[in-house]
Image (cartoon, grey):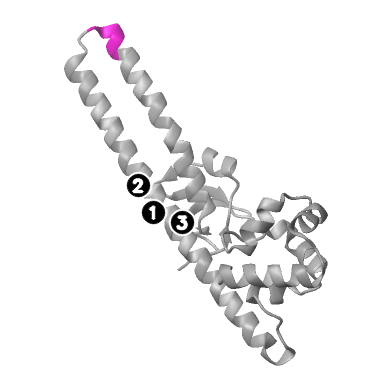
Amino acid sequence: MNQIKIGKFIAECRKKNNLTQAQLADKLNITDRAVSKWENGKGMPDSSIMLDLCKELKISVNDLLCGEMVDMESKNKNQEQLLFDLIKEIEEKNKIIWTSRNIIIFFSMIYLFSGVFIAESLILNEVWHTVTILGICIVFSIPCFCILKLEVSVGTYKCKKCSHEIVPSYFEALCAKHIGTTRYLKCPKCNKKTWHKKILHK
């Protein structure tokens, strides 16, 4: 999606409806700074207010996402292109999330092994040695929770028995036994607990 084009289109429609940025913001219960960001191509309206925005501007969601008034002839073609662009955008964001997860894992492991090595090599006092190891493990557990959050937010988990794909809640994934990114979950389709392999849709 072309954010600059969409931003200019929002500004045009707003002016056509004799609304200032502040008036439009007031109708949508947001700040005029948010409207200014959209119009300057520095952000997009949140999905939760997109329908209300279109209602105030007297346009369709399709018009908004295309950044222009769409006639009936080209409507289907534009919808297909929009769908393709959205899928591509989601895939790009998923790649960034997965890469971030892997980077966090890498640096967390370096921290863990370095900390344990230093504690084993330099701290001779048994009490301080134990306290240091415990502290290292507690600090190491913090990024582990972030890693799981990133893992759950991308792709699905595929049931080994019936191939049904699910997206568990964070708590379900946290409580499940796992080997890497494969988790032991209950499948809502076959109603059995089995191993679910992580699937990244590309």
Q: Does the magenta stretch include residue 128?
A: yes
Element at badge 1?
helix
| Mark 3 or 2, closer to the camera | 2
Badge 1: few (under 14), some or many (20 or more) residues near its Cα, within 10 Å?
few
Q: Position of residue 37 (x, y in %)?
A: 62, 57
Along the viewing direction, whichever of 198 and 47 lies nearer the viewer:
47
Give the alpha-carbon distance from disc 1 to disc 3, as whole Å.
15 Å
Q: Check contact, mark 2 vs mark 1: CB within 8 A.
A: yes
According to the picture, the residue beneath numbered tag 2 turns out to be: 103
According to the picture, the residue beneath numbered tag 1 turns out to be: 99
Q: What residue type is labelled 1?
A: Thr
Q: What residue type is labelled 2?
A: Ile
Q: Give the range drawn in magenta.
A: 125-129
> Is residue 190 visible to us here?
no
Q: Where is residue 65 in the image (x, y as percent from the top left)?
A: 65, 72
According to the picture, the residue beneath numbered tag 3 turns out to be: 198
Q: What is the residue that sits farthest to the bottom in this orientation?
A: 73
